Amino acid sequence: MSYSGDTRVGGPADLRQLPHLTITKLAVGPMDNNAYLLRCRATGEAVLIDAAAEPDRVLEMIGEDGLARVVTTHRHQDHWQALAEVVGQTGARTVAHPDDADELPVSVDEPVTHGSTVPVGDCALTVIHLRGHTPGSIALRYDDPEGHTHLFTGDSLFPGGVGKTWSDADFRTLFGDVSERVFGALADDTWVYPGHGKDTTLGAERPHLSEWSERGW
């Protein structure tokens, strides 16, 4: 079956096979978090985005081929409840933005900032700092050399709007970053993999940017 991105907690993972990278999406935990396993098809090296919950299921998804790194998109607890166990079982290095690092349950081995690169074997992810949901929230961009861009947004962008903020100033900061660093830089065929729920594309969301700005959330 082709990839849909429509996963359910307790249900199977969904697999997307790109020419150089595989993407496995798994829904875990009471808040329907998404954990994404990216594996280089040439080298077998893998990176996990958000060890959110249910470490046994996350480790089952990782399997016997190992894990090089775990990237945590932001400091909120529902995105790292399985982090310590996954790192302990796999020996993976930890990656996060310094502005959120102190809130995580393990030390950060590889701090990243806007524009940093996270290797996945012969592939690479580019870090996009999206301030507002938390100070250190990041998205991760993979530019498929034979296709379109794939963007893992954590809780900064969802179908229907940007992530939750707790003040108008934080909303304006997040909306500004998403407008400039995501919609202003990437094409409509960019596929968006959020921290919870179903996927979307920038083309599906772009017509609603002015609506989001006016409503303030």
Image (cartoon, grey):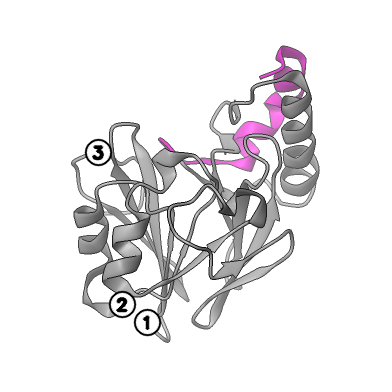
Residue at (29% x, 60% y) in the render:
85
Residue at (81% x, 43% y) in the render:
180
- Name the secondary structure under disc 1: loop
Residue type, numbered disc 1: Gly
Can residue 76 be found in the magenta stretch? Answer: no
Residue receiving disc 2:
66
Tag 2 and tag 1, C-beta contact below 8 Å: yes
| Quadrant where the image shows the N terminus | bottom left
Residue type, numbered disc 3: Val
The image's mark for residue 9 is: 3
Residue at (24% x, 62% y) in the render:
59
Pick whichever, 171 or 22, lies toward us. Answer: 171
Tag 3 and tag 2, C-beta contact below 8 Å: no
The image's mark for residue 44 is: 1
**Residue 104 in sight:** yes
Can residue 197 be found in the magenta stretch? Answer: yes
Q: Main secondary structure of the magenta part?
A: helix
Which x, y percent locates residue 164? 59, 26
- Name the secondary structure under disc 3: loop
Tag 1 and tag 3, C-beta contact below 8 Å: no
The answer for how far apart the CA atoms under marks 1 and 3 are is 26 Å
